[in-house]
Image (spheres, rainbow, N blue to C red):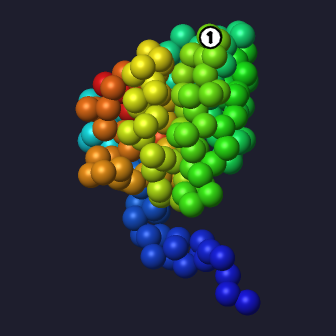
Amino acid sequence: MIPFVDLKAQHRSIKGEIDAAISKALENSAFILGPEVAAFEEEFAAYCGSKIGIGVNSGTSALHLALLAAGIGEGDEIVTTPYTFVATVAAIRYTGARPVFVDIDPRSYNIDPAGIEAAVTEKTKAIMPVHLYGQPADMDPILEIARRRNLPVIEDAAQAHGAEYKGRRTRTPDWPSPPCRPRHTPPGSCQGRN
């Protein structure tokens, strides 16, 4: 049988780097925040094209905070895809909002923009596409719907670090309006903000 993934081999290839980073954190007793987190936030923000990166404890928290920053709360609706990790829906529910699901495009497995418009109601407060397998959702039509409806777009990019859509990273500052676009980096996460 061919193994799906060999994490031991991946670890061996970067073991020295990981051991040095852990040792440095232990020597500095910087277990929470500290210079390593600040460096990560700065480097990851630059990588994603954000002005600011904010490290948080998990991808779920990153999504939750982005929704709160957008003013999402009890009784609101968020248009998203059912084909995602549980964190997407959990974050929506943590705010008291309700996910409204739009089916996927069977070619990309990402949210099908053609179904979004019909899912938007007067209770809709945001659109949350999920970029999967390193492949961005089709953002142009999503952003056009968001512009017309004056809705923020909060991208769940947990599985698409560094992915590009038409030459732009999936978290580029020249895309309009969202307050935050979370990026998961298990076991923590980083939010990009412009």
Residue on which disc 1 sits: 122
Q: Residue at x 72, y 10 (%)?
A: 75
Q: Nearer the viewer, residue 32 or 48?
A: 48
Does 124 appear above or below 139?
Answer: above
Instruction: Say which quadrant the N terminus sits in.
Output: bottom right
Tell me where residue 170 appears, x and y as whole percent. Answer: 38, 44
Q: Please state which amino acid type lies under the numbered disc 1.
A: Glu
In the displayed structure image, the side of residue 50 where residue 21 appears, left or right: right
Residue 87 in view of the camera = no
Q: Residue at x 33, y 26 (%)?
A: 176
Q: Residue at x 67, y 82 (%)?
A: 3
Tell me where residue 91 appears, x and y as whole percent. Answer: 66, 28
The residue positioned farthest toward the bottom in the image shown: 1
Tell me where residue 26 appears, x and y as whole percent. Answer: 48, 47
Q: Secondary structure at mark 1?
A: loop
Does 179 appear above or below 83?
Answer: above
Tell me where residue 98 appears, x and y as whole percent. Answer: 72, 22
Q: Nearer the viewer, residue 53 or 133?
A: 133
